[in-house]
């Protein structure tokens, strides 16, 4: 989850973001701890791990996480899993293309496929009454895609068209380039949806072989949120996945990136404004530094917003973003017509965080806002399912949400300064725009 600073418009937080130093008033009521989660259980069904949150709502969210993400693709075939699951919408062993579409329409369910760096998620959102039917369709798509040759070529053309359209969107291209340069030589440099080269190379035989080799029970994580009992969940899992091979997959956090030299890629474009995005490497998500870096990104984002947008009016969009993946990172993003000037201001604000210790009392409004957003972001069943998966995979425990709040509250000004010095250096940048407006040397000072 990318967390963007929305704090600069608030009085106390604007004071922090702009570097003011008057005392922060005390809040009217004491901070209360978060009650332990008693709604969520974890168990295994035929080797498939299940996270089950029992709620009282009538809708059900069932997400199947195919673990590994970009690391699961064979060499040179990035995007193969998304390719496979997109084809599954055009027919399975049980359903022809038209029969599958009619069946999906009858349930009224929403089926989703979301390829990501650490996993590919395929899921369904449905009502309790239609759960069995919708789940049967989902299971068919995951375990028995038809893979007709004509459908393979049709979906390949669709996916290639989508990737080529990335060239028409500066932000989409910037995101792709920034990840590529930031993680060059590491798994996250690969795109979960693939590239023109990888998609053109993937054959029907590759898809069939990947499905056979990778769809194993040890690689599956199921998260169910809704008013459905455990017996029913166990039956659904057993009937859907019990026939798959067990396999020997084991989820691990990717290897931590070592120290990397600064780098930048510059793409000349004639545009009304210029686009910059740079990434600093962060710790693994299970590190004790992750919470402090999350708060640091919010503080830096607020300071950048206050100085570059509010005070100097040099941009309409600037932020520092915490990227919540197995390997975390902090990204700097800005669009501006004066990139060199903005980079100088960014460097100054970053240097301030590294040199000056913010009084811990000043962080309290920021952390309170984080906690508020944490609960707001997890109001929907869909968001709860995703958060529970992250808690288990990144932190090893679905109760990590309880610790998440406590860890945020424990972040001190000394922690902010320490992680800013440790992680916010050796940035890797992507720039799209007028090359005469940017100095590569200035980019490489971060």
Image (spheres, rainbow, N blue to C red):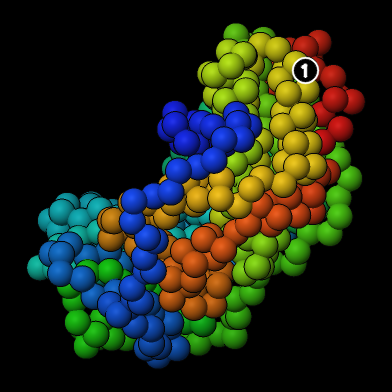
> Toward which corner of the image does residue 204 lie, by quadrant?
bottom right
**Residue lying at 22% horizontally and 88% vertically, measured from the top left:** 231
Q: Quadrant of the C terminus?
A: top right
Q: Nearer the viewer, residue 270 or 305?
A: 305
**Residue lying at 15% horizontally and 58% vertically, measured from the top left:** 107
Count numbered badges in the picture.
Answer: 1
Q: Is residue 174 left or right of residue 157?
A: right
**Residue lying at 68% horizontally and 27% vertically, measured from the top left:** 276
Question: Badge 1 is on which residue?
Answer: 340
Residue 337 screen position, x and y as percent: 66, 11
Q: Nearer the viewer, residue 4 or 414?
A: 414
Residue 206 screen position, x and y as percent: 59, 61
Residue 398 screen position, x and y as percent: 44, 75
Residue 53 visible in image: yes
> Toward which corner of the image does residue 436 lie, by quadrant?
top right
Packing grade of label 1 (10 A; few <14, some 14-19, many >=20) is some
Residue 93 visible in image: no
Above/below status of 237 relative to 2: below
Residue 406 screen position, x and y as percent: 49, 67
Above/below status of 236 relative to 121: below
Q: Nearer the viewer, residue 355 or 339?
A: 355
| Residue sticking out furthest to the left | 129
**Residue lying at 51% horizontally and 31% vertically, measured from the top left:** 14
Q: Nearer the viewer, residue 312 or 180?
A: 312
* Helix, strand or loop at mark 1: helix
């Amino acid at each position: 989850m990318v967390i963007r600073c929305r704090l600069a418009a608030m009085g106390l937080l604007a004071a922090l973001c702009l570097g003011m130093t008057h005392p922060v008033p005390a809040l009217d009521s004491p901070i209360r701890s978060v009650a332990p989660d008693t709604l969520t259980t974890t168990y295994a069904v035929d080797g498939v791990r299940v996270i089950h949150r029992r709620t009282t709502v009538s809708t059900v969210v069932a997400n199947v996480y195919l673990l590994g993400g970009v690391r699961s693709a064979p060499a040179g075939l990035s995007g193969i899993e998304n390719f496979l699951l997109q084809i599954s919408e055009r027919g399975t062993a049980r359903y022809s293309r038209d029969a599958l579409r009619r069946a999906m329409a009858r349930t009224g369910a929403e089926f989703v496929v979301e390829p990501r760096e650490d996993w590919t998620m395929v899921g369904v959102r449905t009502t309790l009454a239609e759960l069995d039917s919708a789940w049967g369709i989902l299971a068919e798509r995951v375990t028995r895609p038809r893979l007709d040759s004509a459908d393979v070529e049709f979906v390949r053309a669709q996916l290639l068209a989508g990737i080529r359209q990335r060239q028409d969107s500066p932000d989409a291209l910037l995101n792709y380039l920034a990840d590529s340069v930031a993680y060059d030589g590491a798994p996250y440099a690969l795109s979960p949806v693939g590239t023109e080269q990888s998609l053109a190379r993937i054959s029907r035989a590759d898809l069939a072989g990947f499905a056979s080799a990778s769809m194993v029970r040890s690689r599956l994580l199921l998260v169910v949120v809704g008013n459905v009992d455990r017996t029913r969940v166990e039956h659904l899992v057993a009937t859907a996945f019990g026939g798959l091979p067990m396999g020997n997959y084991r989820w691990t956090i990717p290897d931590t990136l070592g120290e990397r030299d600064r780098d930048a890629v510059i793409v000349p474009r004639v545009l009304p404004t210029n686009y910059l995005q740079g990434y600093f490497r962060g710790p693994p998500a299970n590190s004790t530094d992750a919470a402090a870096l999350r708060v640091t990104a919010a503080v830096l984002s607020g300071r950048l917003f206050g100085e570059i947008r509010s005070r100097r009016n040099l941009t309409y969009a600037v932020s520092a973003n915490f990227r919540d993946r197995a390997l975390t990172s902090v990204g700097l993003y800005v669009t501006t017509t004066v990139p060199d000037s903005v980079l100088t201001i960014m460097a100054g604000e970053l240097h301030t965080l590294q040199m000056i210790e913010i009084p811990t009392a000043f962080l309290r409004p920021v952390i309170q806002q984080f906690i508020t957003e944490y609960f707001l972001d997890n109001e929907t069943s869909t968001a709860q399912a995703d958060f529970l998966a992250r808690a288990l995979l990144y932190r090893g425990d679905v109760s990590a949400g309880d610790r998440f709040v406590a860890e945020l509250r424990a972040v001190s000004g000394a922690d902010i300064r320490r992680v800013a010095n440790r992680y916010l250096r050796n940035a890797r940048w992507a720039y799209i725009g007028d090359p005469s407006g940017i100095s590569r040397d200035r980019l490489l000072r971060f």
